[in-house]
Image (tube, rainbow, N blue to C red):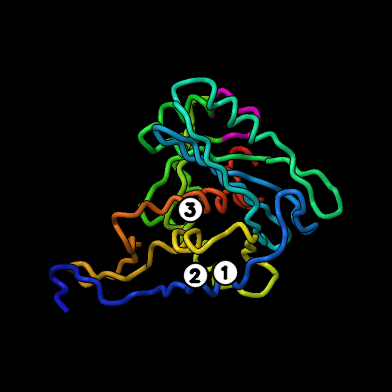
Amino acid sequence: MNTKLGLPFEENFRAMKPESLMMRRELYDAESLPDEVLLLTAGIDVQSDRVEIQVLGFGLGEQTWYVNYEVIYGDVTRMDIWREVDAFRTTPYRTISGRKLYIQACCVDTGGIAGSLAFEYSKAVRKQRVFPVRGSSQGVHQIWPKIQGRHVPKEHKVFTVSVDACKEILYARIKVTRPGPGCLHFSMDCDEEYFEQLQSEFQRIRKDRFGRAHREWVQKSPSKWNQTAALEKEGVDQSPLCLPPANR
């Protein structure tokens, strides 16, 4: 092992096989969510030709349920597609007992190629708890690092999210197989490709030239964008205990 070149010396995460995750799928949908689901949030990603939205449900002990995944195609510079986003975001869901649930908070990723459009949308609907976010990979272990900028007006603030912290939580919870605190629940809508994207990265430990160990996340296939994992992480960072500090 050549420590001077900073080569990795240990992989610290082994993905679960998609087949084993598919066996964990449960019989529920957007109109028949388990009654244990108490709160809904959404992660929104804006691309040049579409908007992708994932809805997650949360219960006691931060149990998490996959609820819905929607891709809305269209010109993101036109108002039509944003009206569709609003309609989707405000659509009610129901539990098995008939209780209505609405999306209570959203994170919109402003770091992509359509970041300015994403920010303008979040700014327009900010009072509806739609928060603009930007991912950071600086190794911070808190989901919401305290670097928001105290003197930035609220309407111009973009919340920084620690991508590494979100990944660590997500991958740890994938390994929780029994229903209970921290468990991830998947519906029958989740296919093999969904689970492959969900685990499209792995963590390894790298030593730098001074012999210091650093954890880093590496994408298994650089040619394949892990959109599912990105939106899942945006959902995880909005769990009831992890809403932006200034907005709890």
Q: Is residue 218 visible?
A: no
**Amino acid type, mark 2:** Pro
The secondary structure that most of the magenta stretch takes on is helix
**Amino acid type, mark 3:** Thr
Q: Which residue is mark 3?
A: 228
Vertical relation: 48 (above or below) 172: above
**Badge 2 element:** helix
Q: Is residue 35 visible?
A: yes
The percent position of residue 152, horizontal first and vertical second, equals 47, 28
The percent position of residue 81, horizontal first and vertical second, equals 53, 27
Residue 18 numbered tag: 2
Q: Residues within 10 Å of mark 3 (few under 14, many from 20)?
A: many
Residue 132 numbered tag: none
Q: Quadrant for the C terminus, please.
A: top right
Q: Which residues are magenta?
A: 122-130
Residue at far bottom of view: 1
**Badge 3 element:** helix
**Amino acid type, mark 1:** Met
Q: Is residue 163 left or right of residue 82?
A: left
Circle nearer the N terminus (3, 1): 1
**Badge 1 element:** helix
Q: Which residue is mark 1?
A: 22
Give the residue displayed 54% in from the left and 29% down from the top: 122
Label 2 near label 1: C-beta < 8 Å? yes
Vertical relation: 80 (above or below) 3: above
Q: Is residue 29 left or right of residue 96?
A: left
Q: Is residue 70 left or right of residue 57?
A: left
